[in-house]
Amino acid sequence: MTNQPFSFTEAVEAVAARDADFQEGLDWQQTDHPLEAAAAFRRSLAKAGDNAVVYTFYGWALAEAGDHHGAIAACRKAIRLDPEWGQAWNDLGEYLMETGRVDEALFAIRRALKSRSFDSPHLAYMNLARYYLYQGSLRRALGAAEQAGRLAPGFRPAQHLAEWIAERMAEWNIRD
C-alpha cells in the first residue's frame, strides 16, 4: 500500500500503456469522435475484461454520443468494480441530471466527493452547483460554484457560474 496521493492521470496512463484499444479510444475522444471512442472502449472491455477506468470512459463516450442511459449503466458497472472510483460517481451524477433524475444525482455527487480515488473535487462541486440550481437553491448553488473555484483556482467554468448566479441573485433581489 502506498501513501502517494491518487492521480487520475496516472491511473488513465497506466491503462493506456497496456491496452492499445483503450489508447485508441482516448485518441478518438480527444478528436471529438464519441462513436469511434465508444467502439474502441468496447473492444478494450471485450479483450481486457472489466475495468473501472475503461467503463468510465466508455460511459463518457456514450453520453457524448447522446446515450445517457447507456452512460449511466457504464458508470454503475465502473462503480461495482471499484466503489472508490470517484470519477464514475461524479459522471453518474451528471448523467442522472441530464436524464431528469435530479434527485438521484445528489447521492452520486456526494459519494464522488468522499471517494479516495478522485482528484477532481472541483468537478463534483460544479455538478453540486447544477443540482442546487435544478432545486432552485441559488445560495447553495453559489456556494458550491465558489467552492469549485477555490479548489481549482483559474477554473473558468466555476468563475463564470458563480458570477452568473450572483448576478441573478442581485437581479432578482435574493439576499438569503
Image (cartoon, grey):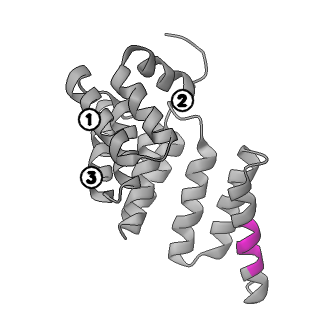
Of the residues shown, which amino acid type is indicated by label 1?
Answer: Arg
Whichever of labels 1 and 2 marks the residue nearer the N terminus, that label is 2
The answer to which quarter of the image holds residue 163 is: bottom right
Whichever of labels 2 and 3 marks the residue nearer the N terminus, that label is 2
83 or 161: which is nearer to us?
A: 161
In the image, residue 55 lies at what x, y percent? 33, 36
In the image, residue 19 lies at what x, y percent? 36, 19
The Cα–Cα distance between marks 1 and 3, rounded to whole angstroms, is: 12 Å
In magenta segment, residue 163: yes
Asked whether the viewer can see residue 85, the reply is no
Q: Is residue 96 above or below residue 118?
A: below
The structure residue drawn at horizontal position 51% and vertical position 75%, both measured from the top left corner, is 135
In the image, residue 26 lies at what x, y percent? 45, 33
Toward the top, the furthest residue is 1
Label 1 residue SS:
helix
Of the residues shown, which amino acid type is indicated by label 2?
Answer: Phe
Label 2 residue SS:
helix
Of the residues shown, which amino acid type is indicated by label 3?
Answer: Gly
Residue assigned mark 3: 70
Q: Main secondary structure of the magenta part?
A: helix
Residue assigned mark 2: 8
Toward the left, the furthest residue is 46
The Cα–Cα distance between marks 2 and 3, rounded to whole angstroms, is: 23 Å
The boundaries of the magenta stretch are 162-167
Which disc, if any, is residue 42?
1
Q: Do the residues labelled 2 and 3 touch (CB within 8 Å)?
A: no
The structure residue drawn at horizontal position 65% and vertical position 59%, both measured from the top left corner, is 144
Q: Is residue 73 above or below residue 23?
A: below
Crowd class of label 3 (few under 14; some 14 to 19; many from 20; radius 10 Å): some
The structure residue drawn at horizontal position 41% and vertical position 59%, both measured from the top left corner, is 105
